[in-house]
Image (cartoon, rainbow, N blue to C red):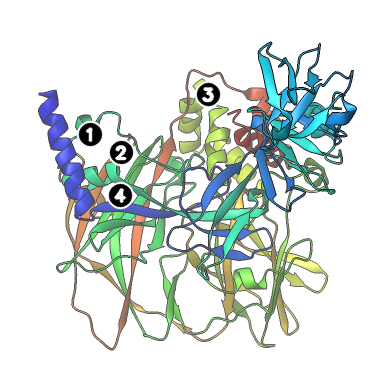
Amino acid sequence: MKKVILIIFLMVVLFNYFNGCIITRTEKITNNFTKDKINEVVLTNYEQIHFDYKGGKYVVHPSIIKGFSYKGIPYRVDLDSVKEIRESNLPSIEPDDLAHKNITEIITNRYKLIEFDSAGAVYNKRENMIEGNNDQGIPQKIPVDETWQIHTVRPTLVSLSDLAKSNNLFIAQIVDRNNWVYIFDKHGGKLVKKHSAITGVTREGVYVEVNPDSILYANVTRTNVAESIFATTGIVLAVAVGIGVIIVATKESCPFVYSYIDGKYVFDAEPLGGATSMVLERTEYSRMEHLKEVNNKYKIMVRNEVEETQYINEMSLLCIKHDPDKQVYPGINSNFYQIKDPIKPLAAFDEKGTDLKKVVSYDDQLFWQTKMPVNSYLLNKNYRQTLTFVFPKPDTAKTVKLIINAGTSLWGSRMIKEMLQLYGNYIDTWYSKINQKGMEYYQMMNFINSEELYQLKIYVKNNNSWIEKSLINGGGPLISETRVYNLDISDIKGDSLIIKCNPPYGFWTVNYTAVEYNYFSTPAVETIPLIEAIANSRTDIKDKIISSDSIYQVMPNVGDQFFAVYKAEGNNNEIANCYFLKTTGYYKIHIDKNRTLQFDRLSSLTKPGEIVRWSNENYQKWVNGEN
């Protein structure tokens, strides 16, 4: 039976492979580049490097000693293969001067080193031979004609520890473990210590090596054959025991939503980020960039890919009919706006004065975010950064629509679980109390508001003071949504609108920001009929997700999924369509309930900024493989 199951499984693998039925997603990562094909890296100065179709690769260059021979030949010798490092060249003795002298070593014409034992070798003038036992006690007879250098003293060696301490030590020669001698020119050899790099060829055909320390983040594309099998055939998970689900090591939240297009499911949305309990349930609108009509239908797949239980209340597909020359953005109150040319910032900069205008002027894949880990000295001075955006403002403007794409960082997502884990065996009691809106609920909301980890305050400058105008909700972290926030600026004087936010180190990303004052309108919104919704075991769950009520589609396990099919409607050629997924629900992250409540640590985190410092420490441990 097992053999039959295995054969069926392999046939399904091949079928899916050759028919292109795969699951793919683009992800943003900040560390652990080792196994990924890298599409693009963004450097800390926001320079973008796009690799060709082969992608960039993470490589580790071993420690080497490099330089040029006295003949100009380049040397690159792996340090692990080096037996001796010599700081000077020994004088070579001519055969006529060898009488009564002990020979310590010779270098042959082929640059092979032969070292003699403590008794040394002697020169046999009659036979024109050098005779003696080598350092392993084996008798040697070497014709003088085959020698390049003859030495009668021992070399001065450089130890590896001394070389590691100072790279200024002169290296005249090295001998590898096979006794081949490398003799450097007058500049000597240099140690290049072990280091990693992202290497590849750019789209322009230029080979590059990028230091990972200079990378803010990288975009990678991941494809999972195992996921594809489950997605396209509905095979019972038990058939594929041991076939895991790949997911970014740091991500700890949100369902993954995939759109079906061109024979594959493409990662398209991750709603509900931060809605970690029933009391935090919310509705979110996600732009479905990749969704296309296939046989008069729209197909999506929703998967649980992290250790959490997901509760989906509603999942409706909306068609937004808008003017072809305008872009659609969702507001925060179930409304949508169509805007032709949002106003870009005149200036954008951080607390160091770094120009961010290039980063935030376009709704693309170039993000501002914190380079982690952060120097502890900086955190002790201020645990927040400052982003400032300057826009033109009409004198008569009373309101403005702030259009912004900002979301939770990948590490910020992981920190949700790190914080919840502190409750340990008390977690269920804590959930119960916050869901009942007890004291713990208000403590949580005050913490969220004061620390701005997952809600970011927006300030507008009025003369010399800053006035809080709105809150931005976090989301993502792999896909963040662009949203519209209505700001009352009736009290703001002058012809400039200056907006700032103070994201805590490591918790936020910002992709795009713009404003619009008067030139916007409301597009038509239609709900696309849901034809069917099928869960893991071919269970019909249409009634569970068709509207918001008290009935949820619950996905408690990694790999749980469902498919939803919507009916495609005819399109008026004079009107453009875009699609948004309306999702209502929440999730509960799985933690280890065998751990005890960490009351002292939880109490310490109420101190302003302490959570950011603790987060930074955790990041450093994660990079070092300590957690």
Q: Is residue 33 above or below residue 434?
A: below
- Tag 2: amino acid: Gly
Instruction: Tell me the distance, in whole angstroms, between the alpha carbons under discs 1 and 2.
Output: 8 Å
Q: Nearer the viewer, mark 3 or mark 2?
A: 2
Question: How far apart are labels 1 and 3 at the CA level?
Answer: 30 Å
- Of 332 and 563, nearer the camera is 563
Instruction: Please tell me whether residue 556 is drawn above or below residue 26 in the rendered image.
Output: above
Residue annotated with mark 3: 424
Alpha carbons under labels 4 and 1: distance apart: 16 Å
Q: Which residue is mark 2?
A: 559
Q: Position of residue 467 (x, y in %)?
A: 72, 65
Name the kind of residue labelled 4 in the image. Answer: Val
Q: Amino acid at mark 1?
A: Leu
Q: Is residue 108 left or right of residue 559?
A: right
Using the image, tell me which numbered label, if any, was put on residue 302.
4
Residue at image position (74%, 47%) is 69
Give the class, few, some or many, for how many residues have Cα within 10 Å of label 3's Cα (few <14, many ≥20).
Answer: some
Label at residue 397: none
Q: Which residue, given by chain and number where applicable, does mark 1 sit on?
A: 237
Residue 339 vs residue 382: left or right? left
Q: Where, by quadrant of the figure, is residue 442 drawn? A: top right
Q: Are marks 1 and 2 in contact (CB under 8 Å)?
A: yes
Residue 278 in the image: state x and y as whole percent.
Answer: 42, 41
